[in-house]
Image (cartoon, rainbow, N blue to C red):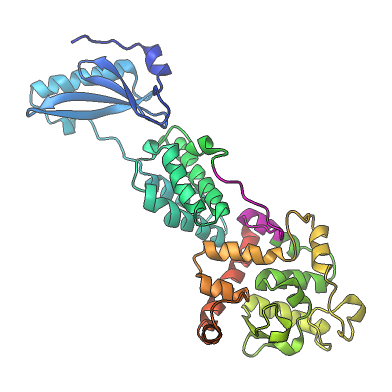
Amino acid sequence: MKRNVLTDTQVKNAKPREKGTRDKLVDGDGLYLELTPSGSKIWRYRYQAGGKDTTKVIGEYPSVSLSEARDLRDRIKKDLVHGVDLQNVLKPPEVFTFEKVAREFFTKQVEGKKAKSYSDTIIYRLERFLFPKIGQQVIDSITAPALLNLLRAIEATGNAETAHRVMQVAGRVFRYGISIGACMHDITGDLKGALMPTVKKHHAALTVEKDIAGLMRAINGFKGSFLVRCALLFSAHCFLRPGEVRHLEWSEVDFNARLIRIPAEKMKAKRPHIIPMSPQVVTILEQLHHLTGTGSYVFPSNRSLNHGHSPMSENTVSAALRRLGYSQDEMTAHGFRGMATTILYEHGWTSDAVERQLAHVVGSDVRQAYDYSQLLDKRRQMMEHYSNWLEGLNKFE
C-alpha cells in the first residue's frame, strides 16, 4: 500500500468538502485524518484484529502533527505484531459531550460568580432546552442544522425570545469549549439570521437579565421623589396594570394577611383581584405608609400628597422611566407585566399561577372561584420568588 501520500500543507488546509458533513483524508497504511463539521481534525488508525476492522484514535491535529501521527501508527503496527495490548499504547482521548462542557462552563464562569437568580436562569435553560436534545452528543460533532432544529422547536411554542436566549447560552458553551480544546468552532455564529426576529410589542418591556438588572439599579438609585421611586419598585414587584397601581387605596392593603385585595369594579375584567405581598413589597408599602398613609390613595398625586384624595398622574411612572434613560421603545409602565411574564415562564412557573396573577380571565366562574381559593399559596410562593430574583439582580455585573 502506498505510504505517506499527505503533505503538511494539505493537512493544515484541509476542510470537509461539503459544509456540515464529515470527511476524511487518507494518508496510507491505515492512517487517515477525519475532518469534523465543527472544524476539528482527528487522526485515526484503521487495522484488523481478530478478523475484524478496528479503528483507534491517535490524536488531534495540530497537537499531533503528520509526522507524529505516522510514528504512532508505526508503533501500534509493530506492537500488534508482538501482541501488545493497544490499551497500553495510547490513552483514549477525553470525550467532551456538550453537557460535560456546559457544566464545567457553568461551574467555572457562572455559579458563585454571578447573582444566584442569573445562575438559576442559565442552568434552567441548559437543563430544560439543551441537555435533553444535545447533551450527550460530542460537542464538536454537533452541527448548526441540528441546533437550529432545536431552537425552531422552541420558536414553534410561540416564544421567539426564549429561542434567542437559549442560542446565546449555547454560544457561550461552545466558546468555552474552544478555550479548553473541546471544540474548534462556535456554530451559533453560523445561525445568524436563521431565527425569527423578536417582535417589539406595543408595550415595550425589558426581558433580558442584564437589562433588567440595569433597570433595577437605576430605580434603586432614582434621584426623584421618594413617592415615585416607590411606585417604580411596586410596579416592578407586583406588575399590576398602571391604572391599578395609580388607583390602589390603603383600604385595599392588608398588612396582617400580607394581601392586596382590589374590588371587581376597579379591575379590567370586572372580577376581584388578590395580590400576595412579598416581604419586599411589604417593606415598600410600610415605608410609604409614613408619607401617604393618612390619605386614600397609596400613590397620590403630588398636588394632593397631604390628603391623598387624588391618584398619581397616569404619566408619572412613564415619565420616571424616561428620566432614567429608557425610551418608549425600550420600557413602558405597562412593560413591567411583560417583563415578569417572560421571566416567570422561563423559571418554570405554570400558566395557571402566572395568568391568575396577571388578573387574566381563565375559565368559568366556578373555575375562577376555585383559582382564588386554591392558588393563593402557590402564587404567594411565586411572588416571593420573583421579588427575590429582582432583589438578587442588584449583584448582577
In the image, is residue 284 above or below residue 236? below
Q: Is residue 128 magenta?
A: no
Number of marks in the rendered image: 0
In the image, is residue 232 above or below residue 49? below
Secondary structure character of the magenta stretch overall: loop
Seen from the viewer's position, the closer of residues 79 and 158 is: 158
- Residue for point 39% across, 52% down: 131
- Residue for point 65% across, 84% down: 271
| Image position, residue 29 (x, y; %) | 20, 16
Seen from the viewer's position, the closer of residues 78 and 337 is: 337
Q: Residue furthest front?
A: 364
In the image, is residue 212 above or below residue 54? below
Taking the image as drawn, is residue 30 in sight?
yes
Position of 395 with respect to 73 (left or right) is right
- Residue for point 63% across, 67% down: 391
Taking the image as drawn, is residue 384 in sight?
no
| Image position, residue 346 (x, y; %) | 53, 61
- Residue for point 47% across, 43% down: 148
Q: Residue furthest right?
A: 303
Q: Quadrant of residue 369?
A: bottom right
Q: Quadrant of residue 1?
A: top left
Position of 68 with respect to 170 (left or right) is left
Position of 287 with respect to 75 (left or right) is right
Q: Is residue 206 magenta?
A: yes
| Image position, residue 4 (x, y; %) | 27, 10
Seen from the viewer's position, the closer of residues 359 and 143 is: 359
Magenta-colored span: 195-215
Seen from the viewer's position, the closer of residues 167 and 75 is: 167
In the image, is residue 222 above or below residue 56? below
